[in-house]
Amino acid sequence: MDSQPLIIGLETATMAGSIAICRGEEVLATSNGDPGTSHSNTLLSDLDQLVKQTGIALGAVDLFAVSSGPGSFTGLRIGIATVKALAVTLKRACVGVPTLEAIAHAAGESELTVVLLPAGRGEVFVQSFSVSAGERVTALDAPSHLSPRTAIERYAHEKNICWTGEGMRVHSELIKGFAEALGVDLFDVVEAKDKSLGMVWKLAPLPVNLARHVASLALARLVQNEVHTADQLQAIYVRPSDAELKV
């Protein structure tokens, strides 16, 4: 079992954030943050506590992974700075996993998964993916930031969609309204099983711990030798920050 790489995954792109320590695909321990508390106040202490809980040494970690965006600008900077510091200090590789890709991975197998994540200013980040039975996630378009209505309209012509992400939860009534207007059956993922006839939209539950999916996708990148040095790790912002928009 110890031959499997030891990976720490950090997810700070969402309000709550999370941490996962994994040995290969095995999840050793997880921690979920508080959406009401800044990552800057809790991330390092939560990580330290989780490391002590598992009994591992940071020096034994093979790969540090972090959600690279889009998402909270402050959260992204904190998470990426933390992983860069760990990678440099311990001379380890690191990898950034796009936030929307990790959310799609968490939703499970689907020919078309549309991820919606709140982007501020009444908009959502949106991107579509396919997720294979082997959990390979393939981006079908580029991430963008749109109004919720425009984002849903972009994919409304599709026969079968798995909607997921915090933006899906926030705007579920809008999705339901589109489904009713189009005559599309709408189910949660469990109810939608075996309902393959006609147009079916599914609402996937939100992941309890997104960091474990960041770690899982990082493992796949490690196997393919698609990891980075600290100076290569970059955030995916998609849109300018509020501070930049005010300039």
Image (tube, rainbow, N blue to C red):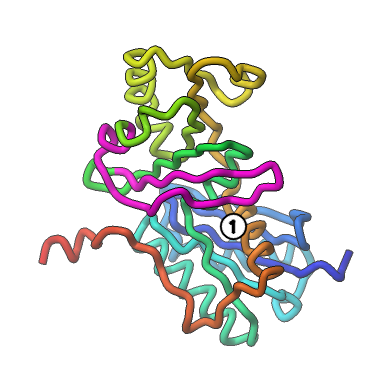
Total number of numbered discs in the rendering: 1
* Displayed quadrant of residue 70: bottom left
List the residue tagged with mark 1: 214
Does the magenta-highlighted stretch encompass residue 2? no
Q: Is residue 114 above or below residue 49?
A: above
Q: Position of residue 192 (x, y in %)?
A: 59, 20
Observer-nearest of 155 and 92: 155
Q: Position of residue 110 (x, y in %)?
A: 58, 36
Left/right placement of residue 87 relative to residue 122 reads right
Name the residue at 50% across, 45% down: 129
Extreme-right residue of the structure:
1
Observer-nearest of 238 and 171: 238
Name the residue at 21% across, 59% down: 242
Extreme-left residue of the structure:
247
Image quarter of the N terminus: bottom right
Name the residue at 26% across, 36% down: 150
Image quarter of the C terminus: bottom left
Q: Is residue 68 above or below residue 129?
A: below
**Magenta span of residues:** 124-152
Q: Is residue 99 above or below residue 149?
A: below
Name the residue at 73% across, 66% down: 52
* Displayed quadrant of residue 211: bottom right
Please name the amino acid that badge 1 sits on: Val
Kindly state the secondary structure of the residue where label 1 is placed.
helix
Q: Position of residue 181 (x, y in %)?
A: 32, 14
Decide: few, some or many residues near mark 1? Use Cα within 10 Å; few <14, some 14-19, many ≥20.
Answer: many
Left/right placement of residue 163 relative to residue 93 reads left
